[in-house]
Amino acid sequence: MLNKYARAFFTRVLTPFAAFLLRRGVSPDAVTLIGTAGVMAGALVFFPRGEFFWGTIVITLFVFSDLVDGNMARQAGISSRWGAFLDSTLDRVADGAIFGGFALWYAGKGDDNVLCAVAIFCLASGQVVSYTKARGESIGLPVAVNGLIERAERLVISLVAAGLAGLHKFGVPGIEVLLPIALWIVAVGSAVTLGQRVVTVRRESAEADAAAAPGNGAAT
Ligand SMILES: CCCCCCCC/C=C\CCCCCCCC(=O)OC[C@H](COP(=O)(O)O[C@@H]1[C@H](O)[C@H](OP(=O)(O)O)[C@@H](O)[C@H](O)[C@H]1O)OC(=O)CCCCCCC/C=C\CCCCCCCC
Ligand SMILES: Nc1ccn([C@@H]2O[C@H](COP(=O)(O)O)[C@@H](O)[C@H]2O)c(=O)n1
Ligand SMILES: [Mg+2]
Ligand SMILES: [Mg+2]
């Protein structure tokens, strides 16, 4: 949903910045790499210590690089298969760091085995949700479904909640409950999304196999 409705807005807002970086000789790949490193640092330095506010601030500063890199590549007319591969692969690394950071907190001082398991489930299911699309497309299917929550939703739900939950350390009472709620929402939403994508791939592969079967007029 965000990918559909918010992307156009962020493209408009970020285009001048992307043009500025190109004029300074910065490459899209450099933005992809630096953005991922920044997200990883924010997640793995701050989240395992329960510093959710500052972790979220650092991650937010870097995570928009994922919208800037592609914008730069398109403006410069240098979009490439390598760039698409690098972008998607490092998305998985960044997501692993974010949900891994939550899991490390709950495995340590956060001391909650259930929430640790929920964070690990968010990490794993998010990766599998993305994999379903990549693998489906690699076997020639359109995978014409996005599902309930895509990557942008997973990030917005968990980071907004983490940033607000972090205000607990500044004396706002009761607000830390937002992070567990968000993790449960992302976990359930990712499971539903996974189901939606698997059902779609099953239907599309059955249709493609039927169309390719001998005797239906299609060339083999
Ligand atoms: C006192 C307040 C404290 C709180 C402070 C914190 C506030 C800020 C909190 C959160 C900000 C979160 C921002 C998250 C932005 C996410 C941007 C982003 O990276 O989106 C990526 C996404 C996908 O890009 P790609 O096409 O490159 O990736 C593809 C995707 O990953 C596919 O995965 P799948 O979806 O299938 O699972 C892969 O299949 C594919 O391989 C891969 O290529 O980009 C978009 O979707 C574009 C839309 C972005 C919309 C961003 C909306 C941000 C909205 C609000 C942020 C500000 C909220 C402020 C709240 C303040 C609360 C007090
Ligand atoms: N280093 C990069 C990063 C991205 N691309 C191209 O942009 C597409 C992704 O666009 P986003 O707006 O989602 O970042 C990607 O598929 C590539 O075509 C690139 O070339 N180099
Ligand atoms: Mg990108
Ligand atoms: Mg990306």
Image (cartoon, rainbow, N blue to C red):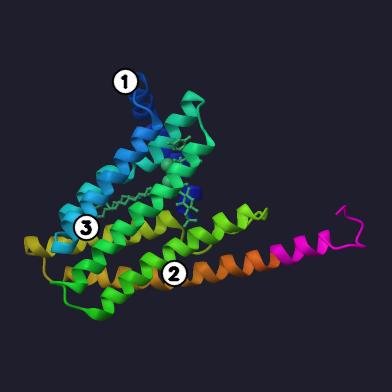
Cα distance between the residues tagged 1 and 2: 41 Å
Q: Mark 3 points at which residue?
A: 163
Look at mark 1 in the image and give the residue it sits on: 24
Locate residue 89, reporting x and y percent.
43, 49
In the image: residue 106, left or right of residue 148? left
Confirm whether the magenta stretch covers residue 210.
yes
Q: Which amino acid does label 1 sit on?
A: Arg
Report the front residue among 26 and 149: 26
Residues at discs 1 and 2 in contact (Cβ within 8 Å): no
- Asked if marks 1 and 3 touch (Cβ < 8 Å), the reply is no
Q: Does 206 sit above or below residue 82?
A: below
Res 115 label: none
Location of residue 21 by image quarter: top left
Q: Nearer the viewer, residue 177 or 205?
A: 205
Q: Indicate which disc, 1 or 2, sits on the residue closer to the N terminus.
A: 1
> If you read the primary sequence from the N terminus, does the residue marked by circle 1 or circle 3 appear first?
1
Q: Circle 3 — which element?
A: helix
Q: What residue type is labelled 3?
A: Gly
- The residue drawn where x is 43% and y is 67% is 125
Q: Does the residue labelled 3 lie within 8 Å of ligand 1?
A: yes
Specify start and end residues of the magenta stretch as a single range.
204-220
**Circle 2 residue:** 189
Residue 27, magenta (yes or no): no
